[in-house]
Amino acid sequence: MSILIKGVTLDGHKKDIFIRDNLIQKIDDSINLSANVQISGDYKAAIPSFINGHTHAAMTLLRGYADDMHLQDWLEKKIWVAEAHMTEEDIYCGARLACLEMIKTGTTFFNDMYWFWKGTARAVQEMGIRAAISAVFIDFFDKKKAKEQIEINMKLFEESRNFGDRVTFTLGPHAIYTVSEGSLKWAADFARDHGLLIHVHLSETQEEVENCIRKQGMRPAEYLGKIGFLGPNVIACHGVWLSHKEILLLKKHGVKVVHNPISNMKLAVGKAFPYERLKTAGVTISLGTDGCSSNNNLDMLENMKFASLLQKYHHKDTTALPAREAFQMATINGAKAFGLNCGEVKEGALADLALIDLQRPELTPHFDLYSDLVYSGNGGCVDTVICDGKVLMANRRVENEETILEEARRCAFDLIKRASHSNG
């Protein structure tokens, strides 16, 4: 399979891009090679497609279902009740909708943690994008539950090899307040033995920090360091309440941190993400949307804008987190965090890229691509998406999108109906 993109704007210059199989083979002023697919780059800009560093994909089914509620009420009365009735088919349906939304907004990789691992993996395999997928590991400090979770994850790890190169199995111990020390240690050991990433929530709320200090006599990152959990394979999500000492500890162990600005603001976690301190310490920072019940979309361009504006507001500094840095969080930084050969449009990189429609009013007059995309653009500006050397969207059309939308609507309302009936 080969693709030739003719006359596209790349880094401010007109270029041709030739893709063979799943790699960008050649970028030049003019390429005269035959290709299976030829795409006109007129009035389009080529960019690396986006990397969503933290989400719960199938929560698309709960989008808009329980908004503007206090956090505990939201969890206990709505979200957990609905999740208790989810099936693998629900997860597949919701994850397929998430994949569609991500493709439509320029994302070709996401880092996921949710129930029914195989449901999400099936959706990813079918839709043509990439994902690091973890099953939620929660034992609530129960030894029997811990044993069950370990057995489930070991089995899924073996079965994950059947899902192809675009699906990466990861471990997903939820957080220090839902997973026992023994299970956290097992996850760290198993991940090191098998070369796996670990996906974990860390220091999202003040309550999490205070409870850890009360129980362990130290803060969350310090506790994870003490038990040997931290390492360069750990993807720590949120990190809003990290102390300076913890930031240095994360850097020492090579931990990657994912910022989720919209979710943090919507759930009122009470503090701004310490971007400048993490950046100064040299920690790799990427960007995530979180799930659709706490965002409520998967648009990484919107996420970039919120990330930048939150830092400017917090620091009272208009130069904080510039547009280009916000863009890098969702591209090259994400690629570095997840060990991907992408995040840049260059020869030898994976053919994961997007074409931006420059004939959009919000991108006109177009002085600077990064400013336009981050501050005025949105996912609707994405015209074409290529992942693994295959065209997933052309002229904003994705195969079978109407069917995916209709089935997701049916699935979501059926889920809530089941949950409501069982809840009285």
Image (cartoon, rainbow, N blue to C red):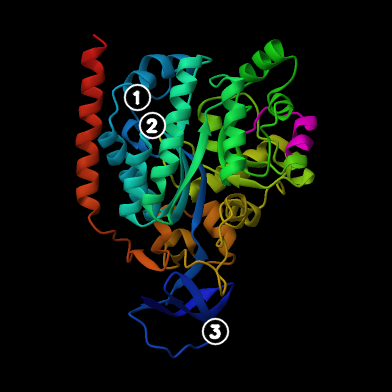
**In percent of the image, x 51 and y 37: which residue is there?**
171
| Residue 55 shown in magenta | no
Taking the image as shown, residue 372 lies to the left or right of residue 32, namely right
- The three-letter amino acid code for the residue at tag 3 is Asp
User: Which numbered disc flags the more N-terminal residue, 3 or 1?
Assistant: 3
Residue identifier under label 2: 115
Q: Nearer the viewer, residue 402 or 333?
A: 333
Observer-side mark, 2 or 1, equals 2
x%, y% of residue 392? Answer: 34, 62
Neighbour tally class for label 3: few under 14, some 14-19, many 20 plus, Cα within 10 Å: few
The image position of residue 43, as x and y in percent, is: 44, 74
Residue nearer the viewer, 190 or 258: 190
Gap between marks 3 and 2 measured at Cα:
45 Å
The answer to which quarter of the image holds residue 202 is top right
Q: Label 3 belongs to which residue?
A: 28
| Residue with the mark numbered 1 | 83
Q: Return the disc, 3 or 2, that comes first in the chain's sequence.
A: 3
Identify the image quadrant of the C terminus.
top left
Q: Examine the image and state in which quarter residue 85 appears.
A: top left
For numbered disc 3, what is the local secondary structure?
strand
State the count of labels: 3
Residue 264: name its quadrant. Answer: top right
Q: Is residue 371 visible?
A: yes
Question: What is the residue that sits farthest to the bottom in this orientation?
Answer: 32
Q: Are marks 2 and 1 in contact (CB under 8 Å)?
A: yes
Q: Position of residue 367 (x, y in %)?
A: 58, 67
Question: Residue, x 57% and y 65% (percent of image)?
Answer: 344
**Range shown magenta:** 238-250
Secondary structure of the residue carrying tag 1 is: helix
